[in-house]
Amino acid sequence: MNDDLYRRYMKAFQTLELHKSGCQVCQPDLPCEAGRPMYERFSRLQDAYRERMAKRRR
C-alpha cells in the first residue's frame, strides 16, 4: 500500500533524530531553536497518523 502519510511521518522522525544526535542543545521534548520546526512537523505528522490508525480500528 502506498502510504504517503506514513512515509512523511517516518522521514520527519529520521530528520529529527539525526538533528538531535548531533545537537548539544536539544533535550528530550525540548528542542533547540533549529530543531523546533523539525519537532513540530514530526509531532503534527505523528498525531495525524495515529488519528488515522484509530479511525481504522473503529
Image (tube, rainbow, N blue to C red):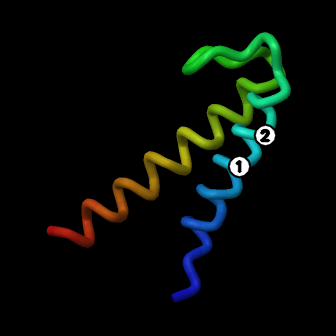
Classify residue 37 as left or right of residue 53: right
Q: Residue at x 54, y 39 (%)?
A: 43
- Residue at the front extreme? 21
The circle on residue 41 is none
Residue 25 image point, x, y percent: 78, 11
Compare residues 51 and 1 and report the one nearer the observer: 1
Corner quadrant of residue 57 = bottom left
Say whether marks 2 and 1 touch (CB < 8 Å). Answer: yes
Which amino acid is tagged 2?
Answer: Leu
Q: Mark 1 highlights which residue? A: 14
In the rendered image, the vertical position of residue 30 relative to residue 51, given as above or below = above
Residue 40 image point, x, y percent: 63, 33
Corner quadrant of residue 42 = top right
Q: Residue at x 55, y 77 (%)?
A: 3
- Residue at the top extreme? 25
Compare residues 5 and 27 and report the one nearer the observer: 27
Which amino acid is tagged 1?
Answer: Gln
Q: Secondary structure at mark 1?
A: helix
In the rendered image, the vertical position of residue 57 relative to residue 32, given as above or below = below
Residue 12 image point, x, y percent: 68, 49
- Residue at the left extreme? 58
Classify residue 54 as left or right of residue 22: left
Q: Residue at x 79, y 16 (%)?
A: 33
- Label 1 packing within 10 angstroms: few (<14), some (14-19), many (20+): some
Q: Mark 2 highlights which residue? A: 18
Q: Residue at x 63, y 67 (%)?
A: 7
- Label 2 packing within 10 angstroms: few (<14), some (14-19), many (20+): few
